[in-house]
Image (cartoon, rainbow, N blue to C red):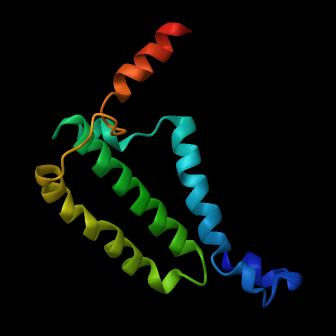
Amino acid sequence: MEHLIEDIIWLQDKDWLRGFVFGLVHTIIPLLGFYFGWSINRLLKVASNGYIAGIFGVVIAHVVADFIAASLDPHLKSAALGIVLGGLLPLLLVPILDRYVTKSKHHIVVGDHEDVKKDLDSH
């Protein structure tokens, strides 16, 4: 990616370009994942209950996309490892939050399956 940016003269020294490659790649990866049906959650559901697998799946997929995007962005390449570590560290809070935080009946995880089923049945 770096050589593409260096070869285009009018893109030189543009402040708005910092992080552009990161943002582009970071958005393309989940977009492709949604369309092709890639799911870390299915794999993780074998090891845990559904919503914990969903939480870990979202975070891991996000961190993988961050790493790939930061590795390709010339301005963030040196920060790729720090981005990954910073993205994974909050996963240590999941067991604590799961044990001590009471989820409301309107929580997004609760009731999602029923809502999806109703939507599918109505079509």
In this rendering, the answer to whether 32 lies above or below 2 is: above
Residue found at the very far top of the displayed protein:
122
Give 45 or 55, whichever is nearer the viewer. Answer: 55
Image quadrant of residue 6? bottom right
Which image quarter holds the C terminus?
A: top right
Image coordinates of residue 21 in percent, x first then y, are: 65, 71
Residue under the image location 20 percent in, 63 percent down: 93
Image coordinates of residue 63 in percent, x first then y, are: 40, 63
Left or right of 58 in this view: 27:
right
Residue found at the very far left of the displayed protein:
99
Image quadrant of residue 114? top left
Give 97 or 1, whichever is nearer the viewer. Answer: 97
Left or right of 99 in this view: 111:
right
Which image quarter holds the N terminus?
A: bottom right
Left or right of 93 in this view: 62:
right
Residue under the image location 60 percent in, 62 percent down: 25
Residue found at the very far bottom of the displayed protein:
13
Image coordinates of residue 91 in percent, x first then y, are: 24, 62
Left or right of 30 in this view: 115:
left
Residue under the image location 75 percent in, 75 percent down: 4
How many marks the image carries: the answer is: 0
Image coordinates of residue 16 in percent, x first then y, are: 74, 80
